[in-house]
Image: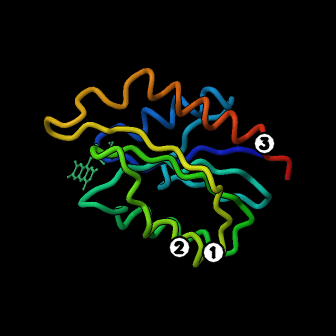
Amino acid sequence: MDVMVVYHSKTGHSRKLATHVAGALGTRAVDIRDWPGASQQTLVFLVSGVYGGKTVPEVLAFARGLQGSPIKVALMTSSASGREEQKGLREALRAAGIRLAEERFTCPGGFLLFRLGRPNQADCEAAAAFATRLSLGQST
Ligand SMILES: Cc1cc2nc3c(=O)[nH]c(=O)nc-3n(C[C@H](O)[C@H](O)[C@H](O)COP(=O)(O)O)c2cc1C
């Protein structure tokens, strides 16, 4: 199965994580605005943050736009709380008929005085290890 890494990032954290993950997987990180589409079965790592306790509209719109795509999506999230809080995103993906990886990656992402410096190098390495493990486990 092919792999792709896409991200949406307002303050750079998701881009940082996605770039690290993509490097580990031998691909490049693509902003959701530049999503080229996928016509075959592909494992797509979708990296984003949490704002106001939920997924931002841009990412929800991206998810809805995947309707009919043969991809499988694995969610990777950073947030100040360290919690995922992407229920709306999971629902949007399911409603679009997109398969979701059961395992998800979450790490802290700094905001104001909270979690300053996160995601850090260790977070990036943990993200890369997660994505590598998941991609190796996918045969179809
Ligand atoms: C305006 C704003 C609102 C945020 N709201 C939340 C929130 O409700 N809960 C949370 O855990 N983190 C919140 N965060 C923290 C972000 O989710 C976190 O910094 C994330 O790593 C940002 O990723 P990005 O830089 O790729 O956009 C907020 C950040 C900003 C800038």
Amino acid type indicated by mark 3: Gly
Q: Position of residue 33 (x, y in %)?
A: 47, 55
* Residue in front for this viewpoint, 84 or 76: 84
Above or below 56: residue 114: above
Question: Element under label 3?
Answer: loop
Mark 1 is surrounded, within 10 Å at the Cα level, by few (under 14), some (14 to 19) or many (20 or more) other residues, namely some
Q: Estimate the spatial distance between the alpha carbons at disc 1 and disc 3, rounded to whole Å.
A: 24 Å
Residue drawn at point x = 71 percent, y = 58 percent: 38
Farthest residue to the top: give it: 121
Amino acid type indicated by mark 1: Gln
Above or below 20: residue 42: below
Return the mark for residue 64. 2
Residue drawn at point x = 85 percent, y = 47 percent: 139
Q: Position of residue 32 (x, y in %)?
A: 49, 54
Amino acid type indicated by mark 2: Arg
Pick whichever of labels 2 and 3 is earlier in the sequence.
Answer: 2
Which residue lies under the disc numbered 1?
67
Q: Estimate the spatial distance between the alpha carbons at disc 2 and disc 3, rounded to whole Å.
A: 26 Å
For the residues carrying marks 1 and 3, which lies nearer the camera in this image?
A: 3
Residue drawn at point x = 59 percent, y = 47 percent: 45
Return the mark for residue 137. 3
In this rendering, position of residue 92 left or right of residue 24: left
- Cβ–Cβ below 8 Å for labels 1 and 3? no
* Residue in front for this viewpoint, 9 or 50: 50
Question: Element under label 2?
Answer: helix
Residue drawn at point x = 60 percent, y = 36 percent: 130
Q: Estimate the spatial distance between the alpha carbons at disc 1 and disc 2, rounded to whole Å.
A: 6 Å
